[in-house]
Amino acid sequence: MKKKTFSKIFWYVFSSIIAIIFLLPIYIAVTDSFKTQKGLYLDTIGLPTKAVFTLENYVQAFIDLDFFKSFLNSLIITVISTVLIIIFTSMAAWVLVRHKTKMSKFIFFLFALAMLVPFQAVMLPLVHIMGKLHLLNPGGLIFMYIGFGSSLSIILYHGFIKGIPVELEEAATIDGCNKFQVFWLIVFPLLKPITVTVSILNSMWIWNDFLLPQLVINKPQWQTIPLKMFYFFGQYAKKWNLALAGLVISIIPMIVFYFLAQKHIVKGITQGSIK
């Protein structure tokens, strides 16, 4: 009994320490976003006192980020990329599952293998090729996001679709449905849990991505929020108070989206992993 009690206390303390380590950067970002530049350097970890507390950081960050424009750019790129990833990868995974051939296994293996290739290894030749094709613009960026997001999405869909009875599709075919109708009317509605998981994982990655937009987007009117955040870090000065305020503003949409759909994340991943 004492051993079980000690074990519970140990894991409780251990979990609390891990939680504090992960939450500490968020705490620092939020509290320091309400401090003046001087107050931030005087006390980085402490709560903002009355002498250094200010809301001006958020007002100035909102203006400097040109928030409505950059928010719209990020939203358009994220939504279009995520929707196209869902459409293409769900169909591809369904075909790979239902048509079991050596070629389908080989193609699935290629998608799994692609996850091992780091982006840094292909970014320079990729940008060079996209430049020759005149695709260094939001359209080209979306095209590249589809490619980089397909591997993980297909693997998740592939595992989930294995658990869907093929008899449902056979019955729909007997009733006169073609392949397109079988997938969109029968199969795709059953993919809701894993679709939510895929959408959240890809949305959070695309929304927060800095490196690929930095390489591809070369006009100020196309810049996303992460690119605009770079405005706060100059050669001779770094406006940490404004940068942290801008960071808090930029992550709010993803936090809201995550909490609205979080119950589907674990459900989708676990169901896809055991089927």
Image: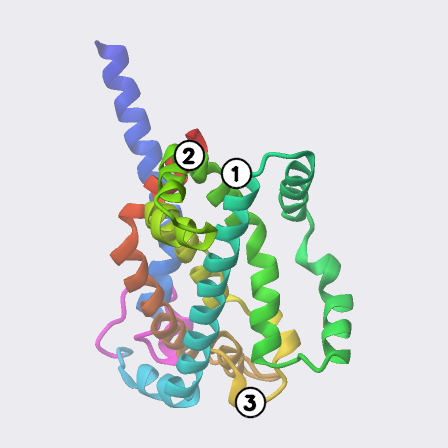
Q: State the scheme by which the image is colored.
A: rainbow
Label 3 belongs to which residue?
220
The answer to which of marks 2 and 1 sits earlier in the sequence is: 1
Q: Is residue 119 above or below residue 39?
A: above
Q: Where residue 118 sits: x, y (%)? A: 68, 53
Q: Identify the amino acid type marked 2.
A: Val
User: Residue beneath label 1, please?
Assistant: 98
Q: Is residue 46 visible?
A: no
The outermost residue toward the top is 1
Q: Which circle, 1 or 3, is nearer the viewer?
A: 1
Callout 2 touching callout 1 (CB < 8 Å): yes
State whether residue 163 is above or below residue 230: above
Quarter of the rendering occupied by the N terminus: top left
Q: Main secondary structure of the magenta part?
A: loop
Q: Is residue 34 magenta?
A: yes
Disc number placed over residue 166 in the picture, else none: 2
Residues 51 and 132: in front is 132
Q: Residue at x 72, y 74 (%)?
A: 130
The residue range painted magenta reads 33-51
Q: Given the image, on which type of amino acid does mark 3 rest? A: Pro
Residue 10: which quarter of the image?
Answer: top left
Is label 3 in a helix, a strand or a loop? helix
Q: Earlier in the sequence, mark 2 or mark 3?
A: 2
Three-letter amino acid code of the residue under disc 1: Arg
